[in-house]
Amino acid sequence: MSRTTALAFSILACISGICSYALLQAVRNHQEFPKPVIPLDVTGNSGIPSYIRGHESEYVRLYVEETVHYDPLRLHGNEEWNAGLPEGGGSWRMPGTNRALFSSMFHQLHCIGLFAKETLVASEGWERDWHIQHCFNFVREMILCHPDLTLEPGNFLEKNYTVERTGAVHICRDWTKVWEEVDKNLKAFKASRTNTTQKD
């Protein structure tokens, strides 16, 4: 397998994972979220809250739209990704301390921006594919539409993942219900096609 083919498969695998995650985010049931702030360890030493206060804010409409911006293969595409983050990259400081935590939403935007940047670096000599820009932009918009305000300690570079494999705890909605419904729908579709064919 050539290096270009391996790189293309790697990028497609990343995009597939991101799109799966976006689907998970899109089907979340807002009624199942806990109260705005749940301490991770109120009696221990950490005292780190697990959510930013006020995450129960009102819903707003986000119209998914195509754009010429956020294009990982354009000269200024990386700058546009960075401009989508607030000053400090989305860090949140614990009141009364200098401890920086990061909202999971901004972490997600950072990661998708990094994928976009790596696509730009790896794309020399590639034929342009507008679908890549569409997918990156769609996932970016879905992250904004369903912000995960879980606070993350940001210490992933300091951890030994052979010993401590977990990170921040996210309260997620049950994505398995979507899979069940899609499976049920496909079976019904196949059954209807079989019945139609048998009648002909």
Image (cartoon, grey):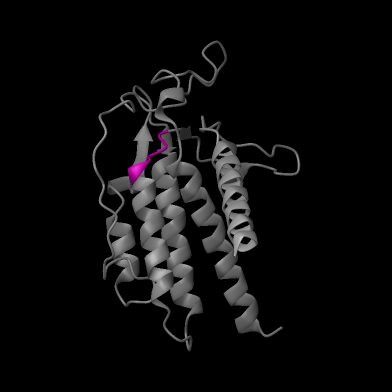
Q: Is residue 51 left or right of residue 158?
A: left
Above or below residue 80? Residue 39 is: above
Above or below residue 158? Residue 84 is: below
Specify the principal SS of the magenta part. loop
Instruction: Spot the residue most to the bottom.
Output: 125
Q: Give the residue displayed 40% in from the left and 51% down from the top.
A: 109
**Residue 60 pos. (x, y %):** 24, 38
**Residue 87 pos. (x, y %):** 28, 47
Q: Quadrant of residue 58?
A: top left
Residue range (magenta)? 145-149
Instruction: Spot the residue most to the front.
Output: 199
**Residue 182 pos. (x, y %):** 56, 47
**Residue 112 pos. (x, y %):** 44, 57
Q: Is residue 159 left or right of residue 140?
A: right
Viewer-proximal residue, 146 or 72?
A: 146
Q: Give the residue displayed 32% in from the left and 25% down from the top.
A: 56
Residue 189 seen in the figure: yes
Above or below residue 51? Residue 14 is: below
Is residue 146 located in the magenta-colored stretch of the structure?
Answer: yes
**Quarter placement of the C terminus:** bottom right
